[in-house]
Amino acid sequence: MSSLENHLQRAEEFLAQANVSDLRAPKVEMWFLAAYHLIEACAAKARLHIMKHQKVADELRRNPTILGEDSDRVAEAFRYLDHVARSKFVYGASGSEEDFQEARSNFALIEEICRRHLR
């Protein structure tokens, strides 16, 4: 199985876990992990590998071959999931309903853009 296929499989597994959870923290963490693997699948399609979630935003900006003109939008959405949403929901308990909806919409943006680039 190729790296692209592996990342897509992992993304689907994490998304399935997000869809069965009723709790916000697991949903946010699974969205984050699914987003990471969708982005890595796009990188694999471009024959690149980011390797660490901490490098995603910088690597997307450095390598526009991964997502082209969508790089900045995906980088910012991923940064939100990583630095804001996970801090509020996974590591703390300070996330509001608005924060949760923002996490959901940032994941949806990443998913839509990545799936479009993977077609």
Image (cartoon, rainbow, N blue to C red):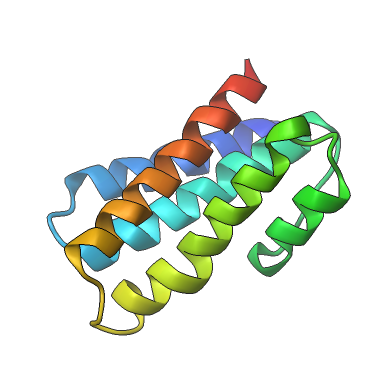
Q: Quadrant of residue 96?
A: bottom left
Note whether 117 is above or below 48 in the view shown: above
Q: Position of residue 2 (x, y in %)?
A: 72, 32
Residue 100 appears in the rendering: yes
Of all residues, the one furthest to the left in this rendering is 22
Residue 3 appears in the rendering: no
Where the N terminus falls, by quadrant? top right
Q: Position of residue 100 (x, y in %)?
A: 26, 59
Picture residue at 62% right of the left edge, 31% below the top = 5
Note whether 85 is above or below 11 in the view shown: below
- On screen, residue 91 versus residue 35, left or right, reads left
Picture residue at 68% right of the left edge, 33% below the top = 4
Total numbered badges shown on the rendered structure: 0
Note whether 61 is above or below 96 in the view shown: above
- On screen, residue 51 versus residue 46, left or right, reads left
Picture residue at 34% right of the left edge, 60% below the top = 28
Q: Position of residue 44 (x, y in %)?
A: 76, 37
- On screen, residue 111 versus residue 117, left or right, reads left
